[in-house]
Image (spheres, grey):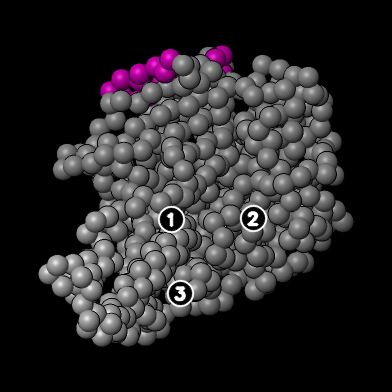
Amino acid sequence: MWNTPWNIIKRRLRAATTDDAGEPNPDGGAVYVMTAIMIIPILLGSAAISIDTANWYYQAARLQSAADAAALAGSVFMPGDQTSAFAAARAVATQNGYTQSTTVNVVPTTESKPSQLRVTITQILHNPFGYIIGSPSQTITRTAVGEYKGPVMMGSPCNIFGNQPTPGYAPFDSASQDPINCNPNPQFWANMAGPGTTGVPLKAYGDEFATRTCAATDSRCNTSKNPQNLEYNPIGYFYKISVKAPVSSINIQVFDPVMAYVGDSCTVNLKSTFTPDKPNDYSTTAGDAAKRYTSGLGNGFCTGDTDWTSGAGAAASVTTFAVRAPSTSSDPLAAPLETRCTSTPNPQQFKGQAFTTSDIEAKLTKGNAKYNDTLARQFRQWVTLCNIPNPEVGDYYLQVRTNLPYGTASFSALSSRYDGYGVVWAGHNRFALRTVVAPTISAGKVTMAGYGAMSIYANSTGSTASFHLARVTSGSAGRSLEITLWDIGDVGAGTVATLTILPPPDAKSGTTPMVLNNCLAVGDVVGTFSAPTAMGASCSFTGVSATKWNGKIQIIRVPLPVTYNCDDASEYGCWFKIQLNYPGVVNDTTTWSTDLNGQPVRLIE
């Protein structure tokens, strides 16, 4: 510390106030006074620098915290909604004391990976002490990059989810917005199970999350309680409707929302012929009823609603469809109910009523004493759930639940994660979904897809089908896609199927087309968590049948190379697919869920 400024000053004062012999200098007092006067600016300057510097460090820490919070808040909207991402980032910066002004600049920008958001905050600080010595201000800049990996979109890159029976064939039917890229018949229906009672082991029937009970041999089943499905989730399933451009309206529709027991192959309670040519106000085109209302798989209208209690529970079944509006939360349960919907009887939801279907021809024929207008309006018809004029650009959510009493429409009930056991029906209600857009716009501007998990039902006489599985954008490079398949073996007695995971056609590893050659199997059938099984170059399972796979969980891990990239700009890009080859009859209800390893929201810089 010998050469500190203060020690130097003291040595110079001593030299100035003594003579060569070390005796006191008679002019020393004046020197002391003059020196003291000269020292004052130096001391003030040192104090100014010290105090201002400490403030700079303090303000820089606050600035970094605000940038971190803003990047995390905005990143949850990436990559699909850049406008909301930027707005959320600025709002959080404001909440932390950094509002855009002449001295504060908040700049959100996108990164090279579409899931990432950079937020840079710059502040010009006033220097209270430095101002005295000619340093009136100091500019400080801090930046942060947030990344969000929310639930993966599943099942569809289009405005439809599930089959779209005979587009344009009869009233209330219309083609998809993009018939070239969107298959109107992807060979599956959306499935929603009733929660069931203790006497019916529902989980093994294919719906992994919507059933309370299970069989002792099922994966993740607590045999000491009834037995209890450990994966039961009463909130149901969500379908994400993304509006990516301004449109005059969107019309959210459900095909066959009614729970009408006809059996997996539609051979129960239905006749092979339907006599009335124009039976009701919803089937007035000549020949429509003869096709729409008949039994079997061949007519394309067979959703396959079934009841595991032989029809006794169908009358008590309730399927609730609720639409939620865009919100700043990444949790769809926190999103508000959409009050602009015009469906009846409630503006927020539509109830898929249940019917036993004995004498169904009479119930569908107007003028008959047994005619039921509600059944006629819903059974194998497109029904408007919600019409939203001038929708916001953002993400709407369609929620489907089966454990709420009829007429329940409150936000608290629809958002509740608790099951009141008020509904006990045991069955599967199958349906399709679509969002009709007005006016017709370019493809991909309004999409509808499963959100994180989906339960589907495939009923076919045998074929090879490719299903859109999950959309994984370039921002996921270096991570692993984890595909959980539940109960994939219901392919008919004596037959086996082959299941293959296909990479996105547009995906590349660097500049080379992507090939899946390092998939790992982890589950109850192939591989274990401690010893995963390499699936080889095909990334497929052969010999899939009910013998081994019924009621079992199978996980496929797909490592993504650090150079993974795909066409993020296209809604049809970056989609992994599942290919099923089943040579025999298939009546398969299955549940698929996908995830990306790692934290859903994280700071990467």
**Magenta includes 533?**
yes
Please tell me which of labels 3 and 2 falls first in the chain: 3
Asked if residue 175 can be seen in this view, the reply is no
The one nearer the camera, 396 or 131, is 131
- Gap between marks 3 and 1 measured at Cα: 40 Å
**Residue type, label 3:** Tyr
Q: Which residue is mark 2?
A: 333
Question: Which residue is at a point 31% across and 42% down the rendered structure image?
Answer: 477
Circle nearer the viewer, 3 or 1: 3
Say whether residue 565 is visible. yes
Circle on res. 305: none
Tell me the residue at 65%/42% (across/down). 192
Residue assigned mark 3: 98
Residue kind at label 1, given as amino acid type? Cys
Please, what secondary structure does the residue beneath circle 2 have? helix
The extreme left residue here reads: 20
Q: How many marks?
A: 3
The furthest residue to the right: 369
Mark 3, mark 2: which one is toward the viewer? 3
The magenta segment is 531-548
The residue indicated by pointer 1 is: 158
Which quadrant: the N terminus? bottom left
Mark 1 element type: loop
